[in-house]
Image (tube, rainbow, N blue to C red):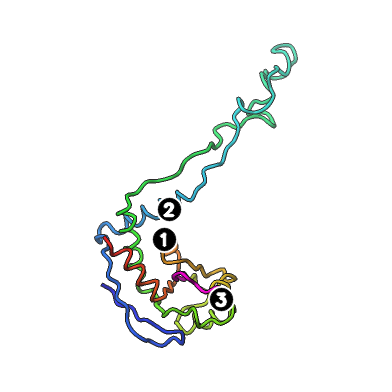
């Protein structure tokens, strides 16, 4: 169980939030989180890279010149891998990189990773109504009030429906990534320097991941 301070739009402490999630044992935690991270990165690969072998390249059916008597090296096809425009030796072919991992293991890994970042977690009250117009400066000032460095990698976790003003205010910030609570994933959790979660999103996350 971990306690987190809840802040309002002005950066003042208005309460506490308790994180209660079942996580992996200490001796297994690093292994299961690593497996889940590798799985996510592998499953994002398209695996569509493809090259043609000498059998697939167009042309080359006729022997370029006779076997003997020319003084040149023997050649059977202009589409040999040794020739320009020829086939590729041991080149990439379409491949499925997907890795399997049990659903319970994936959820356990996500809970473990999320709790491990509790020191970098900032919980704020829902601020949809506080941003009256899309303005990047407004959200940057809010980050400063919440004690979040504007230049670090920030993961902003919100709930639906999210105000368009919030989205438009953060979309130009290359170091800020905004996701919905149901899009929480291992990579974003581990990649961010700070995680800013609205209190509503935190409640949803605990409701979903404490169901087991």
In the rendered view, tell whether residue 184 sits above or below residue 32.
Answer: below
Left or right side of 178 for 35:
left
Instruction: Work out whether mark 3 precedes mark 1 in sequence or the reverse, and give the earlier one.
Output: 3
Q: Residues within 10 Å of mark 3 (few under 14, many from 20)?
A: some
Quadrant into which the N terminus falls:
bottom left
Q: Residue at x 37, y 54 (%)?
A: 36
Please say if the residues under marks 3 and 2 sit with CB atoms less than 8 Å apart: no
Q: Secondary structure at mark 1?
A: loop
Q: Residues within 10 Å of mark 2 (few under 14, many from 20)?
A: some
Q: Residue 98 occupies which quadrant of the picture? A: top left
Q: Residue 55 occupies which quadrant of the picture? A: top right
Q: Which labelled disc corresponds to residue 165? A: 3
The residue where tag 2 is placed is 40
| Residue 171 screen position, x and y as percent | 57, 70
Is residue 161 inside the magenta stretch? yes
- Judge depth for marks 3 and 1 and give the one in front: 3
| Residue 2 screen position, x and y as percent | 28, 74
Q: Which labelled disc corresponds to residue 185? A: 1
Please say if the residues under marks 2 and 1 sit with CB atoms less than 8 Å apart: yes
Q: Residue at x 32, y 81 (%)?
A: 16
| Segment colored magenta | 155-164
């Amino acid at each position: 169980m971990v306690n987190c301070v809840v802040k309002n739009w002005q950066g003042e402490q208005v309460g506490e939030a308790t994180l209660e999630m079942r996580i992996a044992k200490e001796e297994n935690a690093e292994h299961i989180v690593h497996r889940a991270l590798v799985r996510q990165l592998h499953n994002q690969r398209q695996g569509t890279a493809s090259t043609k072998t000498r059998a697939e390249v167009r042309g080359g059916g006729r022997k370029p010149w006779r076997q003997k008597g020319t003084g040149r090296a023997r050649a059977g096809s202009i589409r040999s891998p040794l020739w320009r425009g020829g086939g590729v030796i041991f080149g990439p072919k379409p491949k499925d990189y997907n890795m399997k991992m049990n659903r319970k293991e994936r959820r356990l890994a996500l809970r473990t990773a999320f709790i491990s970042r509790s020191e970098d977690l900032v919980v704020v009250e829902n601020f949809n109504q506080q941003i009256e117009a899309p303005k990047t400066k407004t959200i940057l000032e809010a980050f400063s009030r919440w004690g979040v460095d504007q230049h670090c990698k920030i993961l902003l976790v919100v709930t639906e429906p999210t105000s368009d003003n919030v989205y438009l205010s953060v979309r130009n910030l290359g170091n800020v990534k905004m996701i919905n609570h149901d899009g929480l994933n291992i990579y974003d959790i581990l990649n961010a320097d700070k995680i800013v979660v609205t209190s509503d999103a935190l409640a949803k996350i605990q409701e979903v991941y404490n169901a087991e």
